[in-house]
């Protein structure tokens, strides 16, 4: 009798814990696929897949410059399903980053970043940073030419952070260059601190969603009676999970994770590029003074994203995509203008004479930093003013237009860096690639 009541108590506390993370009843509107697109759930599942495949790889991986590359070859060639586990770990990491970013955009466009969801948003930003860091620390582990030089390029960007940049670089690398201490640091961060922190934050993230009353719904759907999670939500989550797993499995069978020749610290490939998610920054560095490209732009955007939930807004629309038709139109204008202005900016900066050469007596931080920064900020401000005059937007629609411009600009910069930079990082035209 005592044993039985003990058991029931334990089962109850587990059930209570799950209820803090997953609801028992939900609003019917949250079941609509087009509200969330299942993106948060997909990110959570991909994290579980990363931990699972990562632990399998860890059994065989050797975190030293002499052993790392051979252990990957061994995993790929001699271990039962080793290649599959390696490929899944690689492609799932790429997908996790893309899906987390898309999830952030969905939260933003449905206005779910505001009170009472501001804490969920802030935790989310930390999770996004950690997902980037787990991708970055994992990138070095195969220890091939691609990973070695990508990490060398990306960590060299740190030196442009004034005062503390060099110390951060030294601590992270464990020396002046990427070497055995770096591999060991990255391995420990990658398989210990980072995944553990993401999992803790994820539990906190889910708990905050529950505290806010579940996923956001529109004013019109707010008072509808709740429905049971089982089977309504569970069945949908199951379908999304099965489709994602099937896609990942087929993709990982068809496409191998890239692996070049063993890392050679004395031979740098030309061009040497950062990992794909940092290519936008490397491309920005081609046009701006390093202090502005590596410090001012990223820090401004990071601070703005922390501040976003606290901006006073003059509308009550939440839980719907694009508040109004005029907001949607302004979004399309922003998308097109952001695209063309970024392309134009890249071409002008590439083919116009270098301001540092034209005006050698003025410091570079002014000619290639401060002045172009003011031009970019001024152009965005002017464009937003124009949109406001044309469409009479409310404040959240204006913020939405700015975000669309920033996202499309970063995408254009990234694609240019990844595809259209050849030897010596010279710009190449699409027909020259073919
Ligand atoms: C690995 C990273 C992440 C995981 C696993 C995750 C997971 C989830 C899940 C499962 C939900 C509920 C369902 C859904 O919206 O799909 C959710 C909601 C939410 N997430 Fe995330 N998330 C992550 C990253 C982020 C990021 C980067 C942000 C924003 C910066 C964010 C902000 C939010 C907010 C504000 C909600 C509440 C949305 C609402 O009420 O409609 N999350 N997240
Ligand atoms: C947030 C989750 C994670 C992400 C985004 C991630 C990402 C990555 C990436 C991009 C690579 C390089 C793969 C390649 O191109 O070959 C990698 C390698 C590796 N990761 Fe992870 N990882 C995660 C979690 C983990 C965990 C939890 C472990 C183990 C405890 C782990 C263990 C490893 C090992 C041993 C390698 C080297 C073998 C290989 O390259 O496949 N990872 N990871």
Image: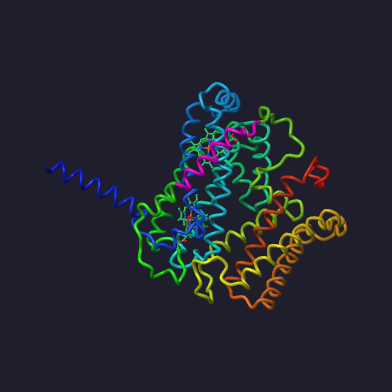
Q: How many marks?
A: 0
Q: Is residue 417 visible?
A: yes
On the image, the x and y values in percent for residue 171 come to 57, 42
Residue at coordinates 35% horizontally, 66% vertically from top-left? 225
Q: Is residue 351 left or right of residue 327?
A: right
Residue at coordinates 69% horizontally, 77% vertically from top-left? 390
The C terminus sits in image quarter: top right
Relative to 414, residue 208 above or below: below
Quarter of image, res 345: bottom right
Q: Considering depth in this image, is 247 or 72 the residue closer to the camera?
A: 247
Q: Considering depth in this image, is 185 or 91 the residue closer to the camera?
A: 91
Q: Considering depth in this image, is 104 or 197 the residue closer to the camera?
A: 104
Residue at coordinates 63% horizontally, 52% vertically from top-left? 163
Q: Residue furthest left?
A: 1
Q: Residue furthest top?
A: 78
255 falls in the magenta region: yes
214 falls in the magenta region: no
Query: How does the figure colour the protein chain or chains?
Result: rainbow
On the image, the x and y values in percent for residue 117 come to 45, 63
The N terminus sits in image quarter: top left
Relative to 431, residue 398 above or below: below
Q: Is residue 194 visible?
A: no
Per the picture, the main secondary structure of the magenta-coloured stretch is helix
On the image, the x and y values in percent for residue 68 come to 58, 27
Relative to 319, residue 269 above or below: above
Provide the residue span drawn in magenta. Answer: 239-259
Q: Is residue 24 left or right of residue 151?
A: left
On the image, the x and y values in percent for residue 374 come to 73, 66
């Amino acid at each position: 009798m005592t044993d039985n009541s003990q058991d029931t108590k334990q089962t109850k506390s587990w059930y209570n814990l799950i209820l803090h993370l997953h609801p028992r009843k939900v609003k019917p509107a949250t079941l609509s696929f087009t509200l969330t697109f299942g993106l948060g759930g997909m990110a959570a599942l991909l994290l579980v897949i990363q931990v699972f495949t990562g632990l399998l790889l860890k059994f065989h991986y050797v975190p030293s410059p002499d052993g790392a590359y051979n252990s990957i070859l061994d995993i790929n060639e001699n271990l039962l399903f080793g290649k599959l586990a390696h490929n899944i770990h690689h492609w799932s990491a790429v997908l996790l980053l893309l899906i987390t970013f898309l999830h952030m955009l969905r939260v933003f466009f449905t206005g779910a970043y505001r009170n009472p969801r501001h804490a969920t948003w802030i935790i989310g930003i930390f999770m996004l940073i950690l997902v980037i860091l787990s991708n970055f620390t994992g990138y070095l582990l195969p220890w091939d030419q691609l990973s070695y030089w990508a990490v060398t390029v990306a960590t060299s960007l740190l030196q442009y952070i004034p005062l503390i940049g060099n110390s951060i670089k030294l601590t992270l690398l464990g020396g002046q260059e990427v070497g055995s201490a770096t591999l060991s640091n990255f391995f420990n961060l990658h398989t210990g601190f980072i995944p553990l922190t993401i999992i803790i934050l994820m539990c906190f993230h889910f708990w905050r969603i529950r505290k806010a009353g579940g996923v956001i719904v529109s004013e019109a759907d707010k008072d509808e009676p709740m429905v049971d999670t089982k089977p309504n939500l569970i069945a949908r989550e199951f379908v999304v999970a099965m489709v994602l797993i099937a896609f990942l499995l087929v993709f990982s069978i068809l496409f191998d994770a890239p692996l070049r020749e063993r890392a050679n610290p004395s031979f740098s490939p030309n061009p040497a590029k950062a990992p794909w998610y940092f290519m936008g920054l490397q491309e920005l560095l081609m046009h701006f003074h390093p202090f502005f490209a590596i410090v001012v732009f990223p820090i401004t955007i990071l601070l703005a994203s922390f501040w976003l939930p606290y901006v006073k807004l003059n509308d009550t629309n939440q839980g719907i995509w694009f508040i109004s038709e005029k907001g949607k139109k302004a979004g399309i204008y922003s998308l097109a203008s952001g695209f063309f202005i970024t392309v134009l900016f890249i071409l002008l900066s590439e083919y116009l004479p270098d301001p540092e050469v034209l005006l050698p007596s003025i410091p570079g931080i002014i000619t290639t930093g401060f002045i172009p920064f003011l031009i970019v900020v001024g152009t965005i401000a002017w464009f937003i003013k124009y949109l406001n005059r044309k469409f009479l937007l409310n404040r959240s629609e204006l913020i939405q237009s700015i975000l669309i411009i920033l996202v499309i600009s970063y995408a254009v910069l990234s694609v240019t860096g990844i595809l259209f930079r050849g030897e010596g990082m010279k710009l190449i035209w699409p027909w020259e690639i073919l």
